[in-house]
Amino acid sequence: MSAQLAQYLLSGLTVGAIYALVALGFAIIYNASHVINFAQGEFVMIGGMVSVSLANAGLPLPLAIPVAVLAAAAVGLALEKFAVEPARGASVVTLIIITIGASILLRGLATLVWDKNLHPLRPFSGDRPIELAGATILPQSLWVLGVTFAIVLLLGWFFGRTLTGKAMLATSYNPLAARLCGVNVRFVLLLSFGLSAALGAVAGILIAPITLTSWDVGVMLGLKGFAAAILGGLGSGAGAVAGGLLLGIAESLGAGYVSSAYKDAIAFVIILAVLFFMPSGLFGKKSAERV
Amino acid sequence: MRIKLLASLAAALFAAGAAIAQQPIKIGAFLSVTGGAAFLGDPEQKTLELYVEKLNAAGGILGRKLQLISYDSAGDAEKARTFAKRLIEQDKVDVIVGGSTTGETMAVVPLVEAAGMPFISLAGAVVIIEPVKKWVFKTPHTDRMACERIFLDMRARKIESIGLISGAGGFDKSMRAECLKVAPAYKIQIVADEAYGGGDTDMTAQLTKIKGTPGVQAVLNAGFGAGPAIVTKNFRQLAIGVPLYQSHGVASKEFIKLAGDAAEGVRLPAAALLVAETLPDADPQKKVVVGYSREYTARFKSDVSTFGGHAYDGLMLAVEAIRRSASTNKEAIRSALESIHGYVGTGGVVNMSAGDHMGLDVSAFRMLEVSKGNWVLVK
């Protein structure tokens, strides 16, 4: 029995790491602007599809991957510049709807630029499974976990030790005060979109060898990443990571022990439960408004 | 004045008569050229185009040219209904060859039954022709036949209890139900029965459950699309160590491409078309499958798939029915289809009847195995 449990946990951690990266993207943009960027899932898709195209065109993977991440970051910057910034005076709901429209546009463009088929990406270091505690894990899963861990550490250093990162944090606490302190809030917003897009793209590239990529992988991954972000507390980086891993494990255990047909439902049941009973999530700050 | 009017009326009638004689025979199609079922619909579309062109080059049918009107339903049942409606009401086609997936086909059945339009489906599930519907025919082997062929092979390998894993689509659910139904007749016990969702990207949880079930001697995956490719990859990853069987829903090189090395050793029932060149000369299907295989590969520079073969059979059956009824009267085409016997297609030898609108039997299925990235006939 415990070999089965180990298998569920390992698979759950792998997919949970992807949810964590997507959730971090949501958290960063939410922090900078209180906007929930529903186009986050499309960045995941762009990362995977661009790297597949480049790899098929003959570019070696170590070159294709950074180019794909930069391409996604460019799309994120363009999204902010042309869709969000012109509407910055509008209400948050309007901005959210704009991002939903952008995600539909990006999906449509993806079918034109590429096609509607599934595409595999070569695993980074082969696909001979590794035995671990009676379960098997793919080398690609180790890449997913390792890179996610490295990124979380990197982001922790960025937000905690660098001036730009601290400026972003300051903007999330109080934009007006940050602006008064000389922080360029518009640049922070731009940077947040670019950074989130890059994170999403990395997630997409890491998972493409395991799950195949296509024009619409962003929909489910985006929604589940959003569920993970809510579970962890919207706006909290640690919450995003914890939420992602928890959601991945919950899905895997649910599919294994309860019912495999309703695996997708688990993420959405979690959103509902969190919003009913614990709206600020696991690590979110309980907000209070001064009347 | 009167004479002029009569003369112009006569001329108009004459012209109209001539125009009707030149009107092309319209073959309507709705196929999943893009989307999750693209590796079904894309070869089907190419096949229909290629052979309509060839038939027209050879003079057409009944002295009239064929015209192919086809739409891309992208695997979506809603779109399939919309396009079928358009084919019936706006384009006014004479026969429909299409419906790459079971879901799309079943959504269209009420429309063609109500409109009295002969419809040759290219989808797999047995529900399409059982119970028999007056206007609906199909060319691919059914999922029930796939289960039976697989169980036969399992018995030959002394396999008695298996695990079953299937997806959420129409074909998946239908094949699962059929396998559960016919298993006892072949003395096969299904000890594990797992399911995955349509867009699922990781089936290790379900396969781990199957692996942990005692007595599993083989695993059968009923499905098509991305799901079986991921199941196959996960299956290798978990090193489950027993034979894996897939359905004819993945009888295409696309599956081998997506699953990669993990597909090695996987067995599935498929039409002889996939191993056309290696068939013995005495095989009744050899001439037809080799002919189609060479023409398709020469034109499109890609491997044949059984799905393109089903479209070929569908078109040829429709054309034969039109020839026999010497008209495009829909009822005549329908009865002519029912009367076809001994037609050798890529799927097998077809013997239609009023009670059997598919015409194939289990022997039309061959058991194939994936070996070094290619299909190999299992003796």
Image: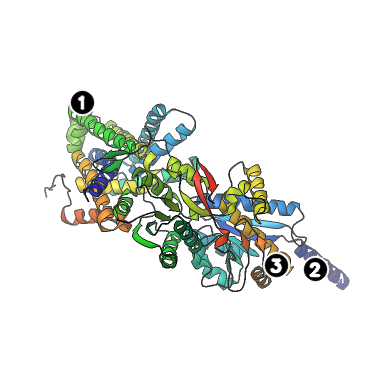
| Residue that label 1 marks | A163
Marks 3 and 2 on same chain: yes
3D distance between C-alphas at marks 1 and 2: 87 Å
Of the image marks 3 and 2, the number of the one nearer the N terminus: 2
Q: Tell me the crowding category of disc 3: few under 14, some 14 to 19, or many 20 or more residues within 10 angstroms, Cα based.
A: some
Q: Could you say where residue B359 lies in the image, as x and y percent from the top left?
A: 60, 66
Q: Quadrant of the N terminus of chain B?
A: bottom right
Q: Could you say where residue B249 lies in the image, as x and y percent from the top left?
A: 49, 54
Q: Which mark is residue B13?
A: 2
Marks 1 and 2 on same chain: no
Seen from the viewer's position, the closer of residues B121 and A127 is A127
Residue at 38% across, 31% down: A65
3D distance between C-alphas at marks 3 and 2: 21 Å
Residue at 20% across, 37% down: A172
- The reply to whether residue A181 is in sight is yes
Which amino acid lies under the numbered mark 2 shown in the image of this protein?
A: Leu
Which amino acid lies under the numbered mark 1 shown in the image of this protein?
A: Leu
- The reply to whether residue A94 is in sight is no
* Figure disc tally: 3
Q: Could you say where residue A98 lies in the image, as x and y percent from the top left?
A: 35, 46
